[in-house]
Amino acid sequence: MDAYTDKLSNLSERIGNPTKETPEAVYSELSVQIENALNASQGESWWQTFLKKNIAKILQGYVRCFPKINVGIETTKYLDFLLETQDGYLDVLEIKKPDAPLLRKDRSHENYCLGQGMPEAISQIEHYLKNIQEHSFELRSFLQENTILMQEL
């Protein structure tokens, strides 16, 4: 049975059992929360808390979450989230507020190009990845000792 068939099966079970939320209801509620946060111009810490609570609903396939991991060596550098996939890979999730200038419209060519915030974000992630790679043994030991399973969020 493939993943799509599994989801349909789960959905039909949930329809028959009204105590479980359907994916549509979950996404609808998340959409309302995001819209309210955008209207309230919430800060980055609000988005971090929101994503920590809801990351498993938004991006499925992660088994462990490590919020606010220090990947700095000589200095303190906290990335927003380090997420472990089902196959053991690590993804770095760096939050940028919705109003961050990541893209800008190039009116002369009628397309979009990188805004001021995007090169900074890419550079920040590259620095994190370099530190993670250089100190992978220490990081792996730390992660094994400090597990936050997605079910615990």
Image: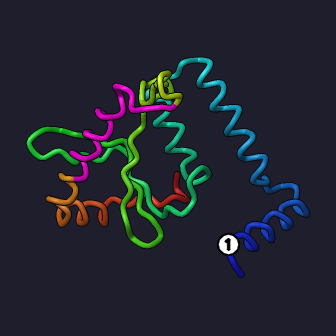
Q: Does residue 48 lie above or below 44 as drawn?
A: below
State whether the magenta stretch is mostly helix, strand or loop.
helix
Q: Residue furthest bottom?
A: 1
Q: Quadrant of the N terminus?
A: bottom right
127 magenta-colored? yes
> Which residue occupies the foreground of this view, 6 or 139?
6
**Residue placed most toward the observer, 105 or 151:** 105
Q: Residue at x 66, y 27 (%)?
A: 35
On the picture, is 19 further left or further right than 71? right
Image location (x, y in percent) of residue 109: 48, 28
Badge 1 amino acid = Ala
Q: Residue furthest right?
A: 16
Residue extending farthest left: 74
Q: How many marks?
A: 1
Dot 1 crowding, Cα within 10 Å, few <14, some 14–19, many 20+: few
Q: Is residue 88 highlighted in magenta?
A: no
Q: Residue at x 21, y 45 (%)?
A: 127
x and y percentages locating residue 53 in the rendered image: 55, 44
Residue that numbered label 1 is attached to: 3
In the structure shown, which secondary structural element does the residue marked by tag 1 occupy? helix
Residue 88: horizontal and vertical position, in percent?
Answer: 39, 70
Report which quarter residue 87 is drawn in: bottom left
Image quarter of residue 136: bottom left
Magenta range: 111-129
Q: Residue at 42% x, 24% y: name it.
A: 101
